[in-house]
Image (tube, rainbow, N blue to C red):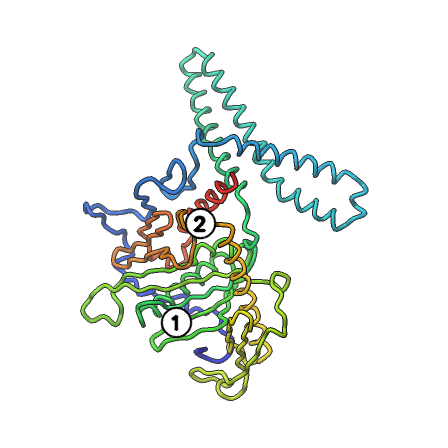
Amino acid sequence: MNPGAGAWMVNSSMLTSTSNIPLAYNRPAHTRNGSRAQSEPVYPGSLFLPGGCSKGLPCRPEPERQTASMFNRLESVVQRFQKLEEELGNPDLLSNQKEYQQVVKERSDIAPVVEKYGHYKILKEQVKENQGMLEREEDPEMRDLIREDLAELKKQLESTESALILMLAPKDPNDDKNVILEIRAGTGGEEAALFAADLFRMYSRYAELRRWKVEIMDANQTGIGGFKEIIASINGKGAFSRLKFERGVHRVQRIPVTESQGRIHTSAVTVAVLPEAEEVDVYIDPNELRFDVFRSSGPGGQSVNTTDSAVRVTHIPTGLVVICQDEKSQHKNKAKALKVLRARLLDAMQAEQEAKIAQDRKSQVGSGDRSERIRTYNFPQNRVSDHRINLTLYKLDMVLSGALDDLIDPLATHFQSEALKGTQ
């Protein structure tokens, strides 16, 4: 399956493709009424958070929608923080280093919430004081100054409140893990394979901007530069926390390079984002594995068709099969194959657990299920639309160049708010 011998690493040729975007589409698109559309988010209708939002900024619930449960939880966090402070002051705790480390970690985890909540209460008191001053003040100029201060304080209060909402949302335990990225061409034949290569370049550029390391683990390349399948590891701080929103079916609408009559075709590519599992996350019984070695295949190279360096690992209980022929060394291929197998087993275990505890997930907006068509890339209009949150951006060229934060940030805000709702 590997297109060549040796380790696949991201190189400059992979990151400099024009991604088949005509230069004409690098300028702002036109709207239906003929005016130029700026390269900023377009949100049709009421949006994905209570109160709606605009211009792609993080959304916040309306103040009246805040429930008492949120502030009750914050008070509980403060009480827990105070208790942990008392425990750290107990000299007997130092005799048990394991428990001491747990207390220190828990305190450090909730300290930002306590600090932010303290700032929120100070701002709320300042707003109350300024409102009282405004009622008592009679001088028009002083009243104008107080109004300006009051408006700024309310803005800060709302921003702090939004931050607290997100901080209370349950944290995904996989957020700090590295990623196994799997991109596969779906419907659309050669055009789908070409778009799979475009998506891989997009994620590679995004990883480069965030100083993550990308390494191709296996690839099945087509004759004109596409990928039927490509599997890569992405290592870096917070990689899964950002890329987990990318899993699903990605649809492309454009004129293929093989189209002679200028017709727009629709193709699809699937993207799987798996948290890289460590040995402590998933235990694999060696007796449940079957290893097969064979000669690697591909278009040339010293190790191709000369040594039994390719490895196929089969997990007998589940039937999962992983093939790796990326390295010249059989041992390195075996290690890489086991890494991918652990990630897939962990993903399967978590999917089974989620199916049991989230029976109503499909009824919610954007469950993240991989069978969903999550995003459309329309080249003629230079448009990218995320269907989970009804977000449209007229800067497809920038997105494919790695500017994914304009999509990922609103998605993160949305799903964090949904997670918070589930805890209330």
For the residue labelled by badge 1, is the local secondary structure a helix, a strand or a loop? strand
Q: Amino acid at mark 2?
A: Arg
Where is residue 52 shown, x and y percent of the image? 37, 38
Nearer the observer, 110 or 170: 170
Front tag of 1 and 2: 2
Q: Give the secondary structure at mark 2.
A: helix
Q: Residue 279: which numbered mark, if any?
A: none
Q: Do the residues bearing badges 1 and 2 touch, measured as CB atoms within 8 Å?
A: no
* Residue 194 image point, x, y percent: 34, 69
Mark before the other along the chain sequence, 1 or 2: 1
Residue matched to label 1: 227
The front one of 403 and 259 is 259
For the image, the number of numbered tags is: 2
Residue drawn where x is 32% and y is 44% of the image:
43
Separation of marks 1 and 2 at Cα, in angstroms: 32 Å
Residue 421 x, y percent position in the rendering: 48, 40
Q: Quadrant of the N terminus?
A: bottom left
Crowd around label 2: few <14 · some 14–19 · many ≥20 (10 Å): some
Q: Residue at x 33, y 75 (%)?
A: 224
Residue 402 against residue 117 in the figure, above or below: below
Amino acid at pointer 1: Phe
Relative to 177, does residue 42 appear above or below in the rendering?
above
Tag of residue 361: 2
